[in-house]
Image (cartoon, helix red, strand yellow):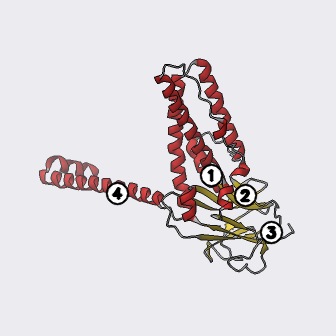
Amino acid sequence: MRHVEVSLLIFTKNRTEVNMKHLFAKCILCIIMISITGIACATECDNPKSSEEVAYCLGKELRNSDVKINQTYQTLISKLAKDEQEKLRQDQRAWIKERDSVCNCTSKESNREKWYQWLLKDYRKTVCVTRYTRQRTAELDRMLTDLSLKSEVKETPTVPAQPASKKVKNVQGNYAMWSTNNKTSGRWYFEVTINRADIAKFSPTALSIGCTDRKFHTTSGVLYQIRSSDTNAPVFREGFALDLESGKLYLRGNGTWYKGVPGSSGGLDLKLNPHNCGIETTVLIAPLIEKGYLQLNFGEKPFVYSIPDSYRPFVEGGK
């Protein structure tokens, strides 16, 4: 059958023209679809709505930053003397080691894309790696700028030291607020109020809110990306119902349960291991808490919404 079609295309001028027109039309359609897809992806990342969309967009940022870091690093290496090159290599290895340790990046996956897929499933790890990546990108950019300035005045290029006054030690506690008590059983509730407009004006950030399995260091919850353009975003309140009898985490947005109500088969699945709960950010968290832009309420004060039946405030005693 295919042989007959080919023969017709060769010997029938009209059929050839028709098929060429069809082929041309298909090409145009493909181009349009690719363009629409690209625009759709860009639009999603301009204003991601769900945690899954935020993870997708942070993944794009991390992949792009990986390329940027590598390019800047290679440029620096090419401009430095051998002893300074080795110093920079050691610095880069130390940064990767610290990032993986602090962010609990335990995956041994050597394929970079598969590593990203593993990372982006855990929102706490995603926020932590995003923070480290943003900071390292800025550090390398500053090094390259300082190096260029030294070259202009004919000084010997060296790895520029960062002024001590500008250094902020990347201690996990500076960027996170978590419950001090682990829960091993029972049903527990807490709320977080996010004033997105004030955060956008003060210090845009990505943030993860949820509960972490203390045995496997995996986190379940929600993911936000608050941008400088979100200055008119409304206040949002998240409620979290942690069920360590059934192995579930139920999510509540502005009073409405989504992905399932407490007691249902919905919600996020958890292992029945000890958990603690809280927030992780890409910027220093203390100013956000002190100014009231981010409010974590484990039950120290009245909740905005009623506690689900059989649940207790997270702050209460008991495990």
Which numbered tag is attached to residue 315?
A: 3
Label 2's element?
A: strand
- Nearest-to-viewer mark from 1 and 4: 1
Which numbered tag is attached to residue 33?
A: 4
Q: Residues within 10 Å of mark 2 (few under 14, many from 20)?
A: some
Lower position in the chain sequence, tag 3 or tag 1: 1
Which numbered tag is attached to residue 177?
A: 2
Depth check: 215 or 176 in front?
Answer: 176
Lower position in the chain sequence, tag 1 or tag 4: 4
Lower position in the chain sequence, tag 2 or tag 3: 2
Label 4's element?
A: helix
- How far, Cα to Cα, is label 1 from label 4? 38 Å
In screen coordinates, is 243 left or right of 228? Answer: right
> Which amino acid, by three-letter code, is at mark 3?
Val
Lower position in the chain sequence, tag 3 or tag 4: 4
In screen coordinates, is 148 left or right of 211? Answer: left
Which numbered tag is attached to residue 283?
A: 1
**Residue 227 location in percent, x, y?**
52, 57
**Residue 245 location in percent, x, y?**
79, 70
Residue 209 visible somewhere in the drawing: no
- How far, Cα to Cα, is label 3 from label 1? 25 Å
For image coordinates 60% across by 53% down, the residue present is: 120
- Residue extending farthest to the left is 13
Label 3's element?
A: loop
Depth check: 131 or 270 in front?
Answer: 131
* Cβ–Cβ under 8 Å for marks 1 and 4: no
